[in-house]
């Protein structure tokens, strides 16, 4: 009797909150339109618990790391404190050529090595590798397996787009969830 051999394979997903018209930031670089209510935040907490590693570009890393590792997060609102704990417990890989170092719990990778590093991670990881940041996602577009936007009920009229301009993707909707606030979570698999 032969035994099946299990090879882990990570799923590279791109998860961000976006406006109804597809932007992760408004024209002024703001993200207030996407501030989650408690129900959406709890969902994000669950997604974070299920994440094997976060993959960040420099910009999103600097925003996330400073905010979610600040000592006052642990003493804040319960749903935020829970996210802060889950965030700090999740490995974070930062892709940047301008940073010289990153915080404990993080690993720095140069942008030139991004594709090779992500291919290796996908082969060696059993679980979700969550890409954050439009620039990094655009540079890894061909490797992304799933797109998971949380669409806020707001129209920004411009800003930084979730999808890179000119992207030609074929996707299949595999999950959707509507929250009381009107935010809609969509999970699409890439059709290869």
Image (tube, helix red, strand yellow):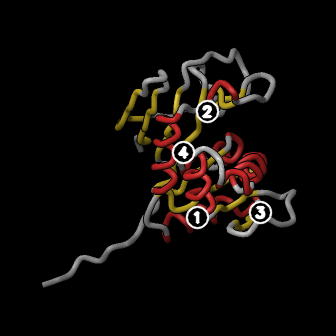
SS at mark 3 in the image: loop
Above or below, 151 relative to 5: above
Closer to the camera: disc 3 or disc 1? 1
Horizontal placement of 106 versus 21: left or right?
Answer: right
Question: Which residue in the protein does label 3 denote?
Answer: 110
Question: Which residue in the protein does label 1 denote?
Answer: 89
Q: Residues within 10 Å of mark 2 (few under 14, many from 20)?
A: some
Q: Residues within 10 Å of mark 1 (few under 14, many from 20)?
A: some
Q: Where is residue 35 shown, x and y percent of the image?
A: 62, 31
SS at mark 1 in the image: helix
Above or below, 90 relative to 148: below
Q: Where is residue 17 shown, x and y percent of the image?
A: 58, 34
Closer to the camera: disc 2 or disc 4? 4
Q: Earlier in the sequence, mark 4 or mark 3?
A: 4
Q: Residue at x 40, y 27 (%)?
A: 178
Which label was assigned to residue 163? 2
In space, the residues marked 1 and 4 are separated at their CA atoms by 16 Å
Horizontal placement of 83 versus 126: left or right?
Answer: right
Q: Earlier in the sequence, mark 1 or mark 2?
A: 1
Q: Residue at x 29, y 77 (%)?
A: 5
The reply to whether callout 1 and callout 4 are in contact (CB within 8 Å) is: no
Question: Which residue in the protein does label 4 denote?
Answer: 79
In space, the residues marked 1 and 2 are separated at their CA atoms by 29 Å
Q: Where is residue 180 shown, x and y percent of the image?
A: 43, 24
Q: Earlier in the sequence, mark 1 or mark 4?
A: 4
Quadrant containing the C terminus is: top left
In space, the residues marked 4 and 3 are separated at their CA atoms by 33 Å
Above or below, 183 relative to 116: above
């Amino acid at each position: 009797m032969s035994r099946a051999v299990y090879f882990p394979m990570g799923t590279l997903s791109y998860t961000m909150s976006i406006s109804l018209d597809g932007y992760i930031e408004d024209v002024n670089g703001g993200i207030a339109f996407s501030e989650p209510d408690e129900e959406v935040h709890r969902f994000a907490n669950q997604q974070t618990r299920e994440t094997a590693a976060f993959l960040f570009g420099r910009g999103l890393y600097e925003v996330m790391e400073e905010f979610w590792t600040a000592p006052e997060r642990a003493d804040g609102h319960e749903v935020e404190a829970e996210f802060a704990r889950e965030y700090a417990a999740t490995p974070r890989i930062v892709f940047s050529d301008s940073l010289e170092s990153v915080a404990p719990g993080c690993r720095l990778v140069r942008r030139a090595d991004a594709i090779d590093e992500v291919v290796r991670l996908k082969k060696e990881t059993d679980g979700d590798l969550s890409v954050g940041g439009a620039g990094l996602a655009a540079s890894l577009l061909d490797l992304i397996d799933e797109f998971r936007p949380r669409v806020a009920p707001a129209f920004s009229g411009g800003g930084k787009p979730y999808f890179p301009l000119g992207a030609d993707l074929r996707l299949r909707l595999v999950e959707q969830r509507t929250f009381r606030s009107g935010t809609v979570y969509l999970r699409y698999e890439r059709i290869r």
